[in-house]
Image: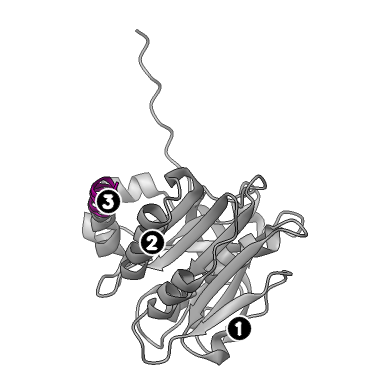
Amino acid sequence: MAERPARRPRKPHSALVVRTERLTPHMQRVVLGGEGLAEFTAGTCTDHYVKLLFAAEGVSYPEPFDMERIREEFPREQWPVTRTYTVRAWDPELRELTLDFVVHGDEGLAGPWAARVQPGETVRFMGPGGAYAPDAGADWHLFAGDESALPAIAAALEALPDGAVAHAFLEVSDPEEEQKIDSDVDVVWLHRGDRPVGEALVAAVRALDFPEGRVHAFVHGEAAFVKELRRLLRVEREIPREDLSISGYWRLGHNEDGWQAAKREWNAQVEAEQEATSATAS
């Protein structure tokens, strides 16, 4: 048997910050461009994402930037830190990539960076990844998410064909965090206030009078409420797994590194628990 050829290392993209814009008090937009995006392309997925590369604190890397060389020559704790963000928009003609960031002061890594980054600065990232786009064959669509899922849900709503039936629920902290989305779908904006993240979303989806026919659902955000909605949709509503794009983008009390390390096992455990519940109920 012939040996499988070695996997070619992925080369990071290098882009320049073109402009920034504060969309709401806690949402910052960063638009990337430049010659470094000549080989970048995004397809039809509305949940395309990229993994931004941030230098470890106090560390600089040799040029030209080479991830394989960094992994060979630097200790692991000095490798670039990655943070994952949804592609809000990709303009292939202008070659501009738009990313939106939730900002809570100095909390986190990417949010504070997005708030202070200036045009002309260099950004490196991997990607894109992505797997979801609204299924034109579905009878209707369901969207539910918090701020972290807002860019992907907005992109999906804007990609829906005219006349598509959809119910969209977006939870944000207060009315100032609502955004204009270029879609005919009437988005239900839920204001969290002092309630736990996702409590209003779960209540809203549970109270929805589900239309007849096959639904294609996109549910993402904080892991705890996603778990509740997964149970509602998979177990109670018996929606097939293949008609659901549902996952925790983040988890309270965890940074991205910690959550990504535990996410696969957590998802498997949740799925197993809910499959067992479904089998018992039937």
Number of numbered callouts drawn: 3
Task: Decide if residue 84 is in sight here.
Answer: yes
Q: Which residue is mark 1?
A: 23
Where residue 235 appears, as percent x and y from the top left, is 35, 54
Q: Nearer the viewer, residue 64 or 91?
A: 91
Magenta highlight on residue 269: yes
| Quadrant housing residue 9 | top left
175 lies above or below 117: below
Where residue 63 appears, as percent x and y from the top left, is 44, 55
**Label whose residue precedes the other's in the sequence (1 or 3):** 1
Give how far apart the Cα atoms at labels 2 and 1 are: 33 Å
Q: Nearer the viewer, residue 238 or 115?
A: 238
Magenta highlight on residue 106: no
Q: Residues within 10 Å of mark 2 (few under 14, many from 20)?
A: some
Q: Residues within 10 Å of mark 3 (few under 14, many from 20)?
A: few
**Label whose residue precedes the other's in the sequence (2 or 1):** 1
123 lies above or below 263: below
Q: Main secondary structure of the magenta part?
A: helix
| Quadrant housing residue 15 | bottom right
Task: Decide if residue 59 is in sight here.
Answer: no
Circle 1: element type: strand
Residue 281 numbered mark, or none: 3
Nearer the viewer's eye, disc 1 or disc 3?
A: 3
Circle 3: element type: helix
Q: Which residue is mark 2?
A: 232
Nearer the viewer's eye, disc 2 or disc 3?
A: 3
The magenta stretch is: 268-282
Amino acid on which disc 1 is placed: Leu
For the view shown, which residue lies furthest in the top direction? Answer: 1
Residue occupying image coordinates x 31% and y 69%:
224
